Image (cartoon, rainbow, N blue to C red):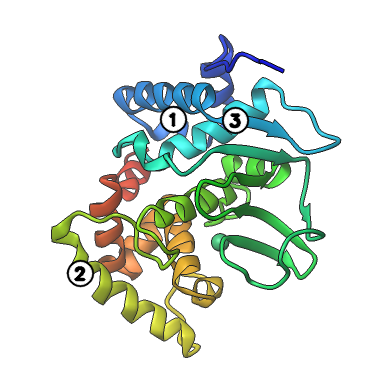
Amino acid sequence: MIFRRTGLPPAGPAIVAEHLAVWPSLSRDEQERLLAITDELLARKNWEAAKGFALDDVVRVVIAAQAALLVLELDTDHYRLVSGIIVHPSTLQATGLAAGPSTGTVQADRLAVLGLAQGGRGPIALAWDQSLAGAYRSERGHNVVLHEFAHKLDMLGGDVNGTPLLPRDVQADWKRVCTGVYRDLERGIPRFPMRWYGATNPGEFFAVATEVFFEQPVELQENEPELYDVLQRFYRQDPAARELAA
Ligand SMILES: [Zn+2]
């Protein structure tokens, strides 16, 4: 079957404005870029519904726009390992998926995952209800779309090891800062607002740090200024300034 891939629908900008909590804090320039990247992701990636679910414009646009936020100041080529996005209505059942904290999964409990980023050029699977909750910021610091797409950025460097493709001048600071925070979490020493899940492995550390950077930026900058700094230098965004100005 041949089907035409479609980009941002006419209602796209209104859908983004209605569902993305971050939207009003973006500058006009950033809003335009976010929509352009959303359009590109919708047109170029395979969007599939899991069995028993159907994709509509709201589902596709709300997910693509959150993914676009992550690479707002990076080239969309950073998503070249994302072949497609498979959307499930709700928490993914673990049947057929590796149980346990395997690479790329966010677990709600042992039997369910909220999202999954498959290795290599594999797709990303997402639970729609969780993706929408992330857009609304219904649970502070949590965003499954940012989390799973961050894993794909991580994979660009080869292994999922918590290190995306970094500019040369960030590499040494990145390693020193992330290792310090990660080792503390491993030892049970809290590093608010980082979550314990970040101590699962370095890949999860980067994914959780990404969620926190975009979703609790002011808290992160206040409590972990060095971690905020290296993330800011990688993503080339300053979400804390955005939030404080909003
Ligand atoms: Zn993960």
Report the residue marked by disc 1: 24
Q: Amino acid at mark 1?
A: Pro
Is residue 14 depicted above or below 174 in this figure?
A: above
Do tag 3 and tag 2 residues touch (Cβ < 8 Å)? no
The residues bearing labels 1 and 3 have C-alpha atoms spaced at a distance of 29 Å
Sequence-wise, which precedes: disc 3 or disc 2?
A: 3
Do tag 2 and tag 1 residues touch (Cβ < 8 Å)? no
Helix, strand or loop at disc 2? helix
Q: Which quadrant does the N terminus fall into?
A: top right
Is residue 241 depicted above or below 104 in this figure?
A: above
In-front residue for pair 172/136: 172
The residue located at (57%, 60%) in the rendering is 104
The residues bearing labels 2 and 1 have C-alpha atoms spaced at a distance of 32 Å
Tell me if mark 3 has few (under 14), some (14-19) or many (20+) residues whose alpha carbon lies within 10 angstroms of its own: some
User: Which quarter of the picture shows residue 18?
Assistant: top right
Report the residue marked by disc 3: 46
**Left or right: residue 132 compared with residue 150:** right
Is residue 1 depicted above or below 62 in this figure?
A: above
Q: Amino acid at mark 3?
A: Asn
Whether disc 1's CB lies below 8 Å from ligand 1 is answered no
Sequence-wise, which precedes: disc 1 or disc 3?
A: 1
